[in-house]
Amino acid sequence: MKITPEERNAVYKTIFSRRDVRREFKPAPIPKDVLERVLLAAHHAPSVGFMQPWDFVLVTKPDSKRQIKQGFLQAHAEAAERFEGERKEQYKRLKLEGIEEAPLGICVTCDRNRTGPVVLGRTAKPEMDLFSSVCAVQNLWLAARAENLGVGWVSIVHDKVIRDTLNIPESIDIIAYLCVGYVEAFHDTPDLERAGWLPRRDASSAIHYEFWSEPTAE
Ligand SMILES: Cc1cc2c(cc1C)N(C[C@H](O)[C@H](O)[C@H](O)COP(=O)(O)O)c1[nH]c(=O)[nH]c(=O)c1N2
């Protein structure tokens, strides 16, 4: 099956216009068929040894969101102390989650024992199962964008809060907590870029031919 130029353009459009969304979530629920398509796309991610270590815990109860939001507030306050001076003040001004505003939360997990102790492709690099679940996150993120759904990844929460709130067993790793919902708009550039936190690196500085090369001073 060949991808047509129009289809290729749609893929690139989706990739380049995907954003991490923390604000402007609309409360409208996500139709079941739309959510099923997005989750099916996530489930079709690549995985080491085809172990498919992920699960998706769907969170809609206000009480659960409230608990996770409380966890965010605590971790966020701790995080602020790690920055200094103006950077700290800038950090505190950033909006870094939409836990209660988004109609849906999705916790993506990784079952590191899913297919037994020896996994094809994991023998030299055991962390490959975790990376596989991250591939599922990215598939979900892009499929959601193609459905005009915003996704925001919230990692400023200790695992224990999410584990306790969602009753996730100790044997399962927590990979991501995602806020999902329709949004007012997708911005052209990342929030952190617009806020002056960091610029996008020049793409060419990330590409090295054959050997590692230090970035040249501009
Ligand atoms: C593993 C991981 C973890 C986080 C993020 C991303 C990833 C990949 N990002 C989103 C991040 O800030 C964002 O992707 C970049 O700023 C680039 O913006 P776009 O995603 O292109 O809009 C993120 N954003 C945020 O507001 N709160 C958070 O806790 C996190 N955590």
Image (cartoon, rainbow, N blue to C red):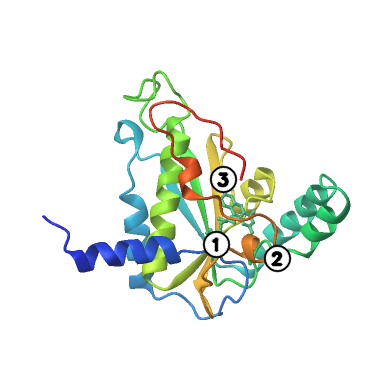
Q: Residues within 10 Å of mark 1 (few under 14, many from 20)?
A: many
| Identity of the residue drawn at 51% across and 72% down | 181
**Towards the viewer: 148 or 103:** 148
Task: Answer above or below: position of 206 versus 191.
Answer: above
Secondary structure type for disc 3: loop
Q: Are marks 2 and 1 in contact (CB under 8 Å)?
A: no
Q: Does the beta carbon of the residue at mark 3 sit less than 8 Å from ligand 1?
A: no
Left or right placement of residue 159 versus residue 133 in this view:
right
Q: Secondary structure at mark 2?
A: loop
Quarter holding residue 14: bottom left
> Where does label 3 land, which residue?
168
Residue at horizontal 70 percent and vertical 59 percent from the top: 67
> Which residue is at 56% across, 45% downward?
168
- Going from N to C along the chain, the mark reached first, 3 or 2, is 2
Disc 2 to disc 1, how far (Cα)?
11 Å
The residue wearing badge 1 is 20
Return the x and y of residue 16 as percentages of the image width and height.
42, 62
